[in-house]
Amino acid sequence: MRFLMCPPDAYDVSYVINPWMEGNVKKSSPQAAMGQWLELTRILKERAEIELIPPQPGLPDLVFTANAGLVLGNVVILSRFLHPERQGEEPHFKEWFLKHRYKVRELPKDLPFKGAGDALLDREGRWLWAGYGFRSELNSHPYLAKWLDIEVISLRLIDKRFYHLDTCFCPLEDGFLLYYPSAFDAYSNRLIEMRVPEEKRIAVVENDAANFACNALNLDCAIFLNKASAQLKEKLGVAGFDVREVPITEFMKAGGGVKCLTLRLTEPVRSEIRAGATVESRLIELRGHLLDSGLLDGALDATVEAGGSFQIVEFNLGKQRQSTSSASIKISAPSNDVLEKILGRLIDLGAVLAPSELKDARLETVTQAGVAPEDFYATTIYPTEVRLNGHWRRVERQRMDSVIVVIDAADGASAVCQLLRELEVGDRVVTGVDGIRTVRKTESRDNRGSPSAADDFKFMGAGVSSERRVELVVERIAWEMRRIRDQAGKVIVVAGPVVIHTGAGEHLARLIREGYVQTLLGGNAIAVHDIEQALFGTSLGVDLRRGTPAQGGHHHHLRAINTIRRCGSIARAVEQGILTSGIFYECVRKGVPFSLAGSIRDDGPMPETRMDLEHAQEEHAKLLAGVDLILMLSSMLHAIGVGNMTPAGVKLVCVDINPAVVTKLSDRGSVESIGVVTDVGLFLSRLVQQLGKLEGVYVQQPTFQQTEH
Ligand code: NAD
């Protein structure tokens, strides 16, 4: 058995390229390091031959020879270091291997690979475990499989303390494995569990992992490592291993352990094993304000978070601030399933498969009513197109959380969003990721500050407006509502009973009376408390003028429901002169349609409240058609429900005292969503005041002063 090592004459912690180096720059002792390295060498020499590569001034980490490359038989795949600090090591290792007659393989320059630090042979030689996520790219794995003619199992590292596979994973003799499961994502843990039976998996706890117990060297039944707990030693003992602690604390300051200091030069080739790497890749394109909108970052993060890796093949940066950029990116994943999940997320962000990869959308037939094929594409709020017979078709009735059904007609196929429950046997549903694209407008963050177009909401940003900005936001919304009214557009109000409890019912009633609201959506409670207020002057029994509980008032809302039920409907109560004021009175008088969706909390309910939620959703969806602006007033349930039914492009204002509710709505990622964290009573009174100021005034684009976000 032969190992390659490098004396630590030039070793030091001179820079920070991993979490272990932080706080340790210039903190290692050259004498102590030399002492520890000599002791390790002495112990190894009892069982193996040691070859040395000369140290090089200015290359302190050359001592970690495991990162030189990956050796199998007489082939070495040289490392490609990610960090410039270590790239200077490459020619020295290359020279050493050439001099010792190895067949040297070199990866493309821009493809990081950390040699035996990130690639570990199963001790039976059946396959190669290869890590990625920090220092090695997944795309290097197919090269390993091809050049070494071996099956490669890709494992994704997720804990930055364990940035190389050999810091948290050590295949042992007789099929055992010493590893720290939390350093890997769930998919990789599954792969490990499929290959290594439970009785052979020796999982270490965090403390042992942090002591670099997995950065170990296994020679026959001996395991050399920095330090192990009594429990780990016992586990390894039961498995037949003898643990030998060799302190290398000086090298841990740079993030290296026993294994990092050695490179096994005598990995045998198993001629009967022949396979490849299961890395799947596809090319996508992104266009828009990629950098300043954060879209590129978002897409790359989404890729890595979902277990994939990327390589930017081409990037064209827009020359001016307002011009757009484009990028061509190769996305890779360890399986087709993972790749499709990643591509699905990227398509939702507006990515398109490259022209060379374009295919028609994949369709699968529904075999059980109300149940989509397993692999269905779930829609977003964004306009979506599907490719059918070579042509892109815009999907109709766009909404989120539905599936796309393709319908054949004499004049060509069309596509429409449908809910799961609407699916019928024989419907053809779009599945997978081929032939799907979403149309996303990317906005330059810099541009958001300066309103230009008359209908431009974006100066307020897709975010939450805190109290100090409410005034400005109200001014803008008032102007917008006035414009929509003048142009015969459509404003929908979604309201909860807090509107009444805060005494703002009269303001909403006024907005309806003055023609600013074209539809009202909500639940049973807004009607119950509005009518309670109209009939008894109370809301939930509280006298709204005095702010004190009215005697017997706690039953007022039930009496209000009963009165309307006796009349048969709210409209009849108005006709009969029983209901003479309030929000619903104004709706009936102005012919403003409303839809009330039931809930488990409802009393009564009011005759109009739809307790059949499928019908309620359908009625809401019909009323939402053609809407320009939705004002969501203090109802988490109904605001989120309506938000889910609304496609991008509709201006949406969510007013709630709870920032979590407005954040949820404005997190739709659409620039037209505004969150206003404030008391709804205050908001409505300011809105009415502001609209009053605009009455009789010729409405033109106001000049808004820039405020900080
Ligand atoms: P919800 O919890 O979904 O929403 C209430 C929202 O109001 C919350 O997000 C809260 O943060 C916000 N809020 C509270 N005070 C506020 C203030 N001063 N200013 C701004 N925002 C404020 O509850 P909901 O929508 O009122 O009711 C849920 C369901 O229960 C609805 O369908 C409703 O019709 C029903 N309900 C029925 C009855 C009844 O029949 N008697 C009574 C209450 C609710």
Image (spheres, rainbow, N blue to C red):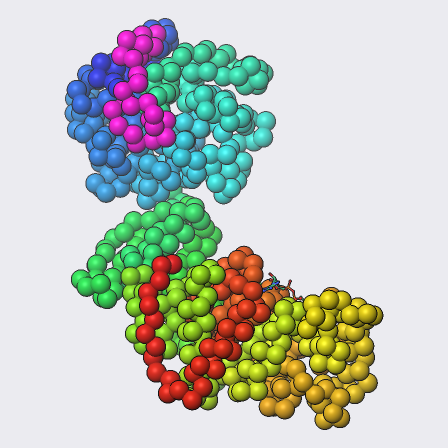
Q: Position of residue 9 (x, y in %)?
A: 22, 14
Is 74 a magenta residue? no
Q: Height in image: 178 above or below 351?
A: above
Please tell me whether the stretch drawn in magenta is mainly helix, strand or loop. Answer: loop
Residue at left 21%, top 17%?
10
Numbered range of the magenta stretch:
13-39
Judged from this view, the residue extending furthest toward the front is: 546
Quarter of the picture containing the C terminus is bottom left
Residue at left 66%, top 82%?
582
Whether residue 80 is visible, yes or no, is: yes
Q: Height in image: 538 above or below 143?
A: below
Q: Height in image: 574 above or below 476?
A: below
For this rendering, which residue is in front, 400 or 427? 400
Residue at left 46%, top 60%?
466
Residue at left 33%, top 49%?
310
For this rendering, which residue is in front, 209 or 548? 548
Q: Is residue 419 left or right of residue 4?
A: right
Count of numbered marks = 0
Q: Height in image: 71 above or below 701?
A: above
**Ligand 1 is found in which quarter of the picture?**
bottom right
Is 38 a magenta residue? yes
Whether residue 598 is visible, yes or no, is: no
Q: Position of residue 53 (x, y in %)?
A: 21, 17
For this rendering, which residue is in front, 231 or 527? 527
Q: In the picture, residue 607 is in which quadrant?
A: bottom right
Q: Is residue 42 left or right of residue 499?
A: left
Quarter of the picture containing the N terminus is top left
Q: Is residue 18 left or right of residue 9?
A: right
For this rendering, which residue is in front, 200 or 249? 249
Q: Position of residue 385 (x, y in %)?
A: 41, 72
Q: Position of residue 627 (x, y in %)?
A: 49, 80
